[in-house]
Every structure is written in C-alpha cells, then in structure tokens.
Image (cartoon, rainbow, N blue to C red):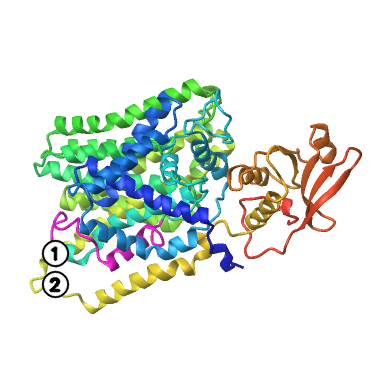
Amino acid sequence: MIALTDFVPSGLELGGFAGVLGAGLVMLLVGRLLLAGRATPELQVLAGWGAISFVLTLWGVATTTSMRWPLAAFVVLAIIALALPRSRPGREDWLALWRIMVLALPIWAIMIAAHVSLPDTYTNFLPNSVYLWDHGFFPADDRIASFAVWPAFPYNVQFATLLASFALPQYPPNAATLFDIMVLLLAGLLFARLLRPTALGTTLDAGFRAAPSWAACAGGILLVTAFNPGFVPRYHFTPYTEPTLMVGVAFIGWLLARMLGRLAEGWHAGRDLWLLSLLLVAFVGIKQLAVVLAGGLLLGAAILILADRRIHRVRAIGGLILASLPMLLIYAVWRLYVGTHFKTGELLLLPSSMWQFDILPGTLASIAAIIAGRPFYFVFVALALVLAVRLTAQRGLTLSTRLLLLTAVIFVVYNVFLLLIYVISMGPVAGEDAHSYFRYMTHLALFVELSLVAAARAFLLARVATKKDHSPAAAPWQRYVSAAAIVGVLLMPIAFVKFLRFDLPEPQRLAWTLVHELDGVVKDGDRLALILPGDNGSVSLMLRAAMTLTPPRRAVDFYPVPAGQGLEAALAKGYRSALISCDPRDGSAKLMEYDGTAWRVAQTWPHRPARGRWGTILSWGPFCRG
C-alpha cells in the first residue's frame, strides 16, 4: 500500500521542481525576446528551448568548454527580457500560466518525489543528463567514460534539465520527469484556448491570446492527460522522451495548419516561419526519430500547399525549406559529431545482409494484435482519418480539415517508417513482435486529439452561427460541465495515484530500499560484486545506476556476477565484497566480505513484506519473490 512518506520530497527534489519552473521561465523569456512578443506563452517556451538547444549543440560540438557559460548568457538574456516592457509577458500571459499551473498542483504534489524508473532511464536518459551536469560537455569515446549504454543519443531534453539544475548543488534525478510534465501542461494550455465557450462566437484569432478560464484550463489538462487516448503514465510521467515528442508533433502541426490558412488568406508568413524554425530545432534534438516525424509534418504541409490554389506554391514551399534549414544544420552537425566521436553509442541499422523483409507478415499481424488490444486510441485515429476525407470533401481546406489531413499524412509516413525500422534495425524477434509499436504511436496522440477537438469546435461554431436567437449566457449544463472539469482535474490525480506513480509498484520499492541500505556502507572507490539470483539484467542495471547517478552518489566498481556463479567467481575477479540480493534460507539480502581466508556476513537486510501491486519492469527473483 502507498504511504504518505512516498510523497514527501527531499530538498533536492524540491530544488529540481523549482529549477524546472525556472528553466521554463528562462525559455519563455528568451522565446518572447526572439519572437518580439508574438505567439502564445506555450509556443514561446518551446521556441526558447529551440534557441538554447541550437546554441548548446553548436557549442558542445565545437569545444569542451563548459556549456554553463552559454547557459549563463541565456539566463542574463532572460533577465534583460524581463526588464524590458515590450518583451515582458503581459497580464493575460501570466494569468494563463498561473491558472494552468495552479490546477496542476495535485499532479505536482504526487510527482515531485517520484523516483526515476524504467530501464531506458538508466541506459541513457539519466546518465546523459548527469554527464552534462558533471562535465559540461558532450561525451565521446576518447573523453571521460560515461555510464550510459547510449551516450550518442540527442541531448535537447538534457539541455533543459541542465538549465533546470544550473544553480543546484547536485543534479536532481526528477528533473526530466518534471520537465516532461511541464511541457504536457503547456500543451494543455493550447487545448484550453480551443475550449473557451466565448471563442465559439468569434473567429479563431479574435482574443486567442486572452487567458482561458479556470474551467477551460482544467479541460485542457484533462485532455492532455486523463482523456488523452495515448496517455500512459509509464511513458509520460517518467523521464522518457515520449511527452516532448508528442507535444512537439502537436505544436508543429498546429502551427503549420494555421500558417497555411493565413497564406491562403493572403497573409505574410514570415513570423510564423521564424517560430516554426525554432520549434523544429527544439524537436529534432529530442530523439533520433524526431527528424522523421518533422519530415512527415513538413511533407503533409507541402502536399496541402500544392492542393490549395490560393497559396503561392513556390514561395510557400520555399518558406518551408528556409524554416527547415536550422533544423537540418543541427541534425547534420550532430550526425557528424556522432560519426567522428563514437564507434557505437546509439541504435544502429543492421547490415543489409541481415535485413529480413520476410518478417513483414508477422510484423503486420503483431501490429494488428496491438491495435485490437488498444481500441480506445485507435478508434480516435480511425475517426480522424475518416473525418479528414469526409470534412475536406464537404468544407474544403479549413483549419480543422488541414489538421485532420496533416494527421492522416504523418500517420501513414510514420507507420511506413516503423515497418522499415522493424525490418532493418530491430532484428527478427523484436521486429516481428512490432516492439514498442504502441509507444511509438503515442507520439501522434496529442495531434490526433487536437485535430478532433478543432473539428468539434468548427462544428459547434457552425451550429451557433445557424441559431438566430442565440444567447451568450451559458446554459446550466455548461456551468455544470465547467465545475465538473475543475473538480475532476483536482481529484482525478489523487484517485489514480497508483497509475501516475510508476515507481511505486514492487519490486522497485524493494530495490530502492536496498539502494538506501547500501548507501550507508558502500564508499567511493569500493569494489562490489553483485550476485542477483534470477536477474535478467534489469536489477543489476538499476542498482548500479541508482548508486552511481543519484545522491548520495558513489563511485563504485560494480561487477555483476554471471548467472549460476557465486562468491568464488567474484573472488576470482579480485572482488572481496559482494552483495547477495537473496539468500533463500532466510529471505534476506546480505553484504559479504572476504577476510583473506573465508567469506563472512558483514550486513544482513531482511526483505520486508511486499506492499501493493507487483510490476514487471524489474526481475522478481533477486528479491526472493517468484
């Protein structure tokens, strides 16, 4: 069962929360300065993130001088922006941010003290963030060794957490999780702008920057979390990159659809292209496959340009190419750095001799089974695809139909890409099983939902326009819905706390208990063998990463003893201390010490009874279970 102590944050965790909010403020102010105050705060934050990522990538590729220097310059720039009346956020901007963050207080209260979890966190997300914090430069094969299995992954999220930890004495392990949550909440603010009842009687641009009401902000948060068909706490409330990819697709797709509408009306798109360029830079450095998602959106935009006679095609497509150049530059520079500084360090394609197109039937069957097992999400996808065709035939190219058509294009492009990756990168087992297919599909979830919300808004706008005696006064049911949204957003996180806190199921609790016990007896420079009966590698990875990367950090030389071997194997490798995670005779963990003649028990930690549900992320065997 869950205890209140699970939600009491440490000083460093509180510092990480404050740091993430501070990083968001710096990004907001930098974005506003670069955009001359245009766009809404949620877009300005991502624009500022893009500018910071652009500079830090070029800096890190060119020199090993600490990235804290350019970060400090951005902080100074943000202070200047705050001091200048023209670049300072206005009342409506502050009010919108205040409402969305206050309504999210239950989420913050639940998540601030969350431990880092999941294998990918330990293989690259957390190690890469800690490496930047420790050294201020990128890892490389000929530099200080990195704990990460994949040190050559892109670093835009790590740049954000480095900024968040800029003034802290240690790196806060919760920084990436809290940054993901903040970005999701910013997406909720965009949804809130579409939910305002007062907006139904006006054009989309009229008053769009005005702060949404409390009820609209509550609805926006619910749409990006509880009502989001692709929301999975395991992916989106952990340090994974899924939330930022999901929000990036939605924001870029939204901007493209609005920009094309303005071009069709004869507007000049220079300001939108500058914003688009910054968003693309922020997006492409999140993960390797982000460039494919960005390319799919840009391809969809190019198709819509060619289909719309009102748009000057050469000028518009030229504008898209121009806006893409900074993204392509950063992508190329990073690929050059990885190619010249790492032998591996990232996921690579298999040799062409190992490509197996014959697994495609099995892969398609696995995808069909995954779709059948996730009907809630894929019904929304199917609805968006059907509406893209039907509404375009009925209404032509509008904001909502452009969003739906962009959704259709990127869905097709991304699925073709994934099928190819299953064949040429993942190997026959993972490829035929369509490994992580649903997780990849969640990258499109917010954009699918945004398209459907925009289509629903257009439908309601048309209904309002046809009512001759329409009264602006809210109907009683609207007031009830507004109240329910506010109550729901405040209570639902508490009701579903077990699903949000993915670090709470056993055996992760037992693993963290063991880490805290070891913290008291293991010192820097110690050499410790790990004997973990029944481990598939997950517990070994978690224990080593937790001891090495989370406070109080210990520089320990770990040796995971191969399965079926024991203390003599550890001694043969020169290790005179060993952790046996499960002694089946008494169900305890033991720290063993070799005194020169025999092994003796130095510490014993009985495994407490399991509390609550058991997860499948870590092996059970090392904790005398299963």
Q: Return the x and y of residue 91 as percentages of the image width and height.
A: 21, 59
In magenta, the rendered stretch is: 202-229
- Could you say which is closer to the camera, residue 214 or residue 461? 214
> The N terminus appears in which quarter of the rendering?
bottom right
Q: Return the x and y of residue 64 as percentages of the image width and height.
A: 46, 26
Identify the amino acid type marked 1. Answer: Gly
Residue at image location 29% in from the left, 76% down from the top:
480
Residue at image location 68% in from the left, 40% down from the top:
524
Cα–Cα span, label 2 and label 1 = 8 Å
Residue 210 falls within the magenta-colored stretch: yes
Residue 418 falls within the magenta-colored stretch: no
Crowding at dot 2, Cα within 10 Å, few <14 / some 14-19 / many 20+, comes out as few
**Circle 2 sits on which residue?**
472
Mark sitting on residue 201: 1
Placement of 172 over or under 484, stated as above or below: above
Residue 47 visible (yes or no):
no
- Could you say which is closer to the camera, residue 155 or residue 417? 155
